[in-house]
């Protein structure tokens, strides 16, 4: 029943946007973008934090008009930055953190804009990369670990900023091409060609890039940083083909194929490989 309701809601929104595109195209473009970039879940409440986030140091950083939450597990001079994905928050790292703590490293996790305890109503990769940069200036991480959209943001961040302090990046379940995500969105809402074109124009006007040019496959080609790309063949959120695109252009990365872990990739054996890569290779 819930799936039927969600399906009908998506199609109703799409029909409204299609009709609006002929009457008020600018408003239609803005609304379509908002639906595309506003998460529905992933928020946290200060009085009811998950256990993994309760007993550590919290610090709120400011970037422009955004306030974003960081969580700190103090350790040695090795600093790891954890970057979660869409409609998630820093608590998603609960299973990985114990493996990383064994190294004695300092661990920093962030809540993305519009997620966790951070402010904002939208999230896009440009914004996420800027948040990573603000966090990097504060904590000076040598290692980046990202999941899903967070992993794509790490790749884009390093491509854009070329941070010399970052030595290794771990990408877990990352999407590659924004064009693929965009097409899925268009299909989900059954947007017509006019509405689809209006959205593409909106992205070009706002971010100065074409949707097809915004790709982790393209960004990773410029990376000199060592990396791991892990993706599950049974991922029903981000296609396994997306990982192969990234692996094909990131020359200094190792591709790890898993099976049966789904999009979350929660697995002690995989997390041990991540830890070994960060500290023993």
Image (cartoon, rainbow, N blue to C red):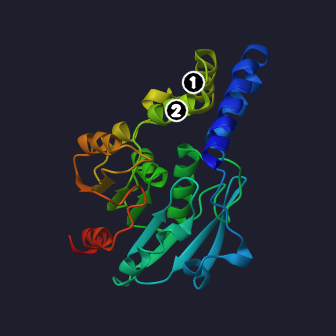
CB contact under 8 Å: marks 2 and 1: yes
Q: Is residue 95 visible to the viewer in this orientation of the structure?
A: yes
At horizontal 44% and vertical 57% (from top left) the residue drawn is: 147
Task: Tell me residue 77's x, y (percent).
Answer: 40, 79
At horizontal 43% and vertical 60% (from top left) the residue drawn is: 264
Between 63 and 12, which is closer to the camera in this rendering?
12
Between 92 and 58, which is closer to the camera in this rendering?
92
Q: Is residue 266 above or below residue 253?
A: below
Label 2: element kind = helix
Q: Alpha-carbon neighbours of circle 2 within 10 Å: few (<14), some, or many (≥20)?
A: some
Q: Is residue 1 above or below residue 9?
A: below
Q: Quadrant of residue 24?
A: top right
Position of residue 178 in the picture relative to residue 189 (left or right): left
At horizontal 48% and vertical 74% (from top left) the residue drawn is: 94
Task: Tell me residue 238's x, y (percent).
Answer: 42, 46
Total labels drawn: 2
Label 1: element kind = helix
Please tell me which of labels 2 and 1 falls first in the chain.
Answer: 2
Q: Is residue 77 visible to the viewer in this orientation of the structure?
A: no
Between 133 and 218, which is closer to the camera in this rendering?
218
Task: Tell me residue 181's x, y (percent).
Answer: 49, 36
Residue occupied by mark 2: 182
Distance between the Cα atoms at labels 2 and 1? 9 Å
Q: Is residue 144 above or below residue 190?
A: below
Quadrant, the C terminus: bottom left
Residue farthest toward the front in the current orientation of the protein: 1
Look at discs 2 and 1 and give the one toward the viewer.
2
Between 254 and 61, which is closer to the camera in this rendering?
254
Q: Quadrant of residue 273?
A: bottom left
Task: Tell me residue 63's x, y (percent).
Answer: 65, 56
Residue occupied by mark 1: 200
């Amino acid at each position: 029943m819930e799936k039927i309701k969600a399906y009908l809601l998506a199609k109703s929104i799409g029909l409204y946007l299609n009709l609006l595109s002929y009457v008020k195209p600018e408003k239609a473009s803005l609304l379509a973008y908002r639906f595309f970039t506003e998460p529905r879940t992933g928020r946290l409440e200060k009085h009811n934090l998950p256990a993994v986030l309760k007993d550590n140091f919290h610090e709120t950083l400011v970037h422009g008009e955004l306030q974003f939450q960081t969580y700190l597990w103090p350790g040695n001079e090795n600093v790891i930055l954890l970057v979660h994905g869409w409609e998630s928050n820093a608590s998603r790292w609960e299973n990985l953190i114990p493996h990383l703590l064994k190294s004695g490293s300092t661990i920093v996790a962030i809540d993305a804009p519009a997620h966790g305890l951070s402010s904002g109503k939208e999230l896009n990769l440009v914004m996420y990369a800027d948040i990573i940069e603000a966090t990097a200036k504060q904590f000076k991480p040598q290692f980046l670990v990202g999941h899903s959209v967070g992993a794509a943001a790490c790749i884009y961040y390093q491509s854009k900023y070329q941070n010399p302090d970052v030595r290794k990046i771990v990408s877990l379940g990352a999407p590659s091409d924004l064009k693929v995500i965009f097409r899925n969105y268009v299909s989900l809402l059954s947007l017509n060609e006019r509405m689809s074109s209006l959205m593409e124009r909106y992205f070009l006007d706002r971010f100065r890039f074409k949707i097809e040019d915004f790709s982790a496959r393209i960004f990773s080609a410029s990376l000199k940083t060592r990396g791991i790309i892990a993706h599950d063949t049974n991922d029903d959120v981000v296609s396994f083909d997306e990982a192969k695109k990234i692996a094909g252009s990131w020359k200094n990365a190792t591709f790890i194929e898993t099976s049966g872990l789904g999009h979350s990739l929660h697995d002690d054996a995989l997390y041990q490989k991540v830890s070994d890569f960060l500290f023993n290779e």
